[in-house]
Image: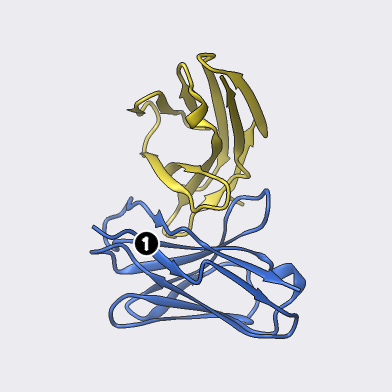
Amino acid sequence: DAGVTQSPTHLIKTRGQQVTLRCSPKSGHDTVSWYQQALGQGPQFIFQYYEEEERQRGNFPDRFSGHQFPNYSSELNVNALLLGDSALYLCASSLAGQGYNEQFFGPGTRLTVL
Amino acid sequence: EDQVTQSPEALRLQEGESSSLNCSYTVSGLRGLFWYRQDPGKGPEFLFTLYSAGEEKEKERLKATLTKKESFLHITAPKPEDSATYLCAVRSGNTDKLIFGTGTRLQVFP
């Protein structure tokens, strides 16, 4: 049973560039959430996708956008990168409609903005 | 505003020295309190979900408990491989997002 996978593992970009991160959910899951984790901090919720639509969004600017595909995989796009966007980006998957459903995390993508 | 506070920030234990980690929360309508373990540079690994006050769950040397205001993660006779950051998160109301604390960094020395 494959868990949550993310690609790439590491990424280095320069300020002003754009980046796309990818996530495949755990088998059987249909909901994907994205989190940003700065060094020494807990993960911060960016947004959640279900049925190919953004269902909920945290306090992140419009530079952060996403997409969910019919196979439930998801992408996170960040435009006009800033130094402060350097962080570990985590994808979590879950199964909708189960009330107290747990979210399972992938290994993350480490983004460094120079 | 929903909030999670974890203490202590860091904890150093000798192997076999039991202790507890604290997670205090304020939330409107708790729909689950979650404990995760995170190793450096890795994604959080799910440990437990607690739903209501008085509930307890155990896994190997770990035991999680929940009251109306806080949760404890008890570690009994820890081993060096238990060294990690332990994260607490809550879900409230009719939202699916998790609100995390900043974690407790645990180091267990042989």
Asked whether residue B31 is in view, the answer is: no
Q: Is residue B102 left or right of residue B44?
A: right
Give the farthest residue toward the top.
B17
In depth, the one of A109 and B24 nearer the eye is: A109
Which residue bears the numbered disc 1? A4
Q: Is residue A22 left or right of residue A102?
A: right
When the figure is inspected, residue A103 is found, relative to residue A53, above or below; the finding is above
Image hue for chain A = blue
In depth, the one of B21 and B50 nearer the eye is: B21
Rendered residue at 70%/84% (across/down): A80
The amino acid on which the numbered mark 1 sits, given as a three-letter code, is Val
In depth, the one of B55 and A71 nearer the eye is: A71
Q: Secondary structure at mark 1?
A: loop
Quadrant where the C terminus of chain B sits is: top right
Could you tell me residue B74's position as x and y percent? 47, 23
Q: Is residue B7 left or right of residue B42?
A: right
When the figure is inspected, residue A105 is found, relative to residue B68, above or below; the finding is below
Q: Residues within 10 Å of mark 1 (few under 14, many from 20)?
A: many
Asked whether residue B78 is in view, the answer is: yes
Question: How many labels were placed on the picture?
Answer: 1
In depth, the one of A112 and B54 nearer the eye is: A112
Image hue for chain B = yellow
Could you tell me residue B59's position as x and y percent? 34, 29
